[in-house]
Image (cartoon, rainbow, N blue to C red):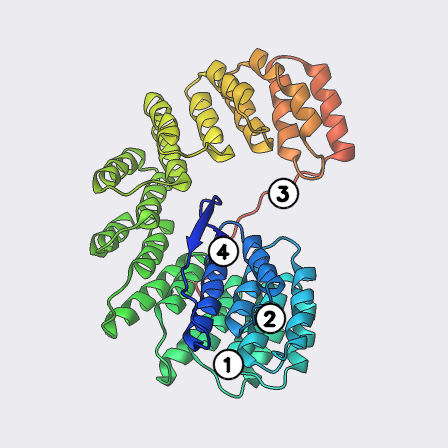
Amino acid sequence: MLITCLNKSTRLVHSIVTVHYQPRSSWVFCASLNSWALAMKKASSSASPLQALHLYSQLQRQYHPVDSFSILFALKSCTHVFHGINIIRHLHAHLFKLGFGANTYVATSLLHAYAIQHFHDARILFDEMPSRNAVTWNVMITGFSRQGDVRNACTFFDDMPLRDLGSWSAMIAGYMNNACWREGLALFRKMAGDNLLKPDQMILCTVLSGCGLIGSAGLLLGKSVHGFATKIEWELNVEVSTCLMDLYLKHGLLSNAFFMFNMVRDCNVVTWTTLICGAAQNGYGKEALLIFEKMMKSGEKPNELTFTGILTACVQAGMVEEGRRYFRMLDEFGLRPRIQHYGCMIDLFGKAGLLGDAYEVISTMPLEPNVVIWSSFLSSCKLHRQFKMAEKVIDQVMRMVQPQNDGGVYSLISDLYVLNGKWTEAERLRKYMCNHVRKVRGSSCVTSGVL
């Protein structure tokens, strides 16, 4: 049997499953059915999930019986398809005709697909389900959280007949992802204090990620979570250790982050990238480059975000030639430069006064420059008083900016006119700003430290 499916690189590969036909042999039937399910599993996890649906269609056309596994993988592929709601509804009707409507596992997988693509249909299906398990309730809690409806998520959590570890994890994540820090941390404390269920690594990562977003109070709470994990003698895996590194780096505690980094046994690209980006954002550009060199020696391959951190470090340290070299390395690793990489190079050249090189990057980059790119370039022109260079792009920038969102760009252009003595143009732009542009007021936030 020759089954065509897509691998992770989206190229067609052939998975050949040889089945020797023997009349009236049940194992031949099982092998054939499992072969289809295996191929659909591979396709549903590939870069082209539509292939799994194509295989499911072939399964039907060849009159092979459908099992629950084939349906589960077909539904899984629908969650990765843009606007896949119509396909999900078609599969819903089909599996109902096949008699799988009362299968709890199939119904839960269908509910998950609806929750991702069209949550209103998920709510209807949940009310119609004859039997539900903990996973079913967890899907709804996660679905409400994604919609920003934390109140209904909490109601479902409270109404659950039996909660498992996934239920607590879903509710805590729902609170933290919707900026309900107090409620999320209180629920985590309740879970840890009841001693009924032991928080897992995923819950710790969720709590630590939230702690990194709430200021100095978050640092204190993050340290408490770290102490809790140490107290129960957990061996922190790479994911939790990376979350702790990120927490410490966001609060400028590089020594703590390096301590956690040295504790990690098997560092992956996320761990290295977290340390590089954190060092760069805290102004330790040269140290970030040294970390990158160690990463290269370890054999770990960098990704696009790694190079964003490296180029940011070059901007912080003003290392132009190093920035050029690392930008060229993107191609050496088979990575395509993205808008943030070009933005770093423009910022690097602009701060160094190499406005000609910055303009050349903008002119030759295959991507359309956005407002951030133009703002960086114009800021460099203002810094080095190079109005002639700014004059080349002002008309183009003015056609792109939006009065309701980009008031700062208008102010920047007005300042450039003033610096060059073009008072008429500056006055005209200021009048336009008074009538059409709304500049967002600057604001600051101080965390009280009380949650």
Of 272 and 407, which appears nearest the observer? Answer: 272
Of the two numbered discs 2 and 4 in the rendering, the one whose residue sits closer to the viewer: 4
In terms of sequence position, does the residue under pointer 3 or pointer 1 come before the other? 1
- Left or right: residue 47 versus residue 82 is left
Dot 2 and dot 3 residues touching (CB under 8 Å)? no
Which is closer to the viewer, label 1 or label 4?
4
**Which label sits in the foreground, 3 or 1?**
1
Which badge, 1 or 4, comes first in the chain's sequence?
4
For numbered disc 2, what is the local secondary structure? helix
Q: Give the residue type that dot 1 points to.
A: Ala
Identify the residue position indicated by label 4 in the image: 43
In the rendered image, which residue does mark 1 sit on? 134
Answer with mark 2 or mark 4, whichever residue precedes in sequence. Answer: 4
Towards the viewer: 91 or 191 = 91
Helix, strand or loop at mark 1: helix
| Element carrying mark 4 | helix
Q: Which callout, 2 or 3, points to the residue nearer the camera?
A: 2
Give the residue number, with chain letter if any, for mark 3.
441
CA gap, disc 3 and disc 4: 50 Å
Mark pair 2, 4: CA separation: 18 Å
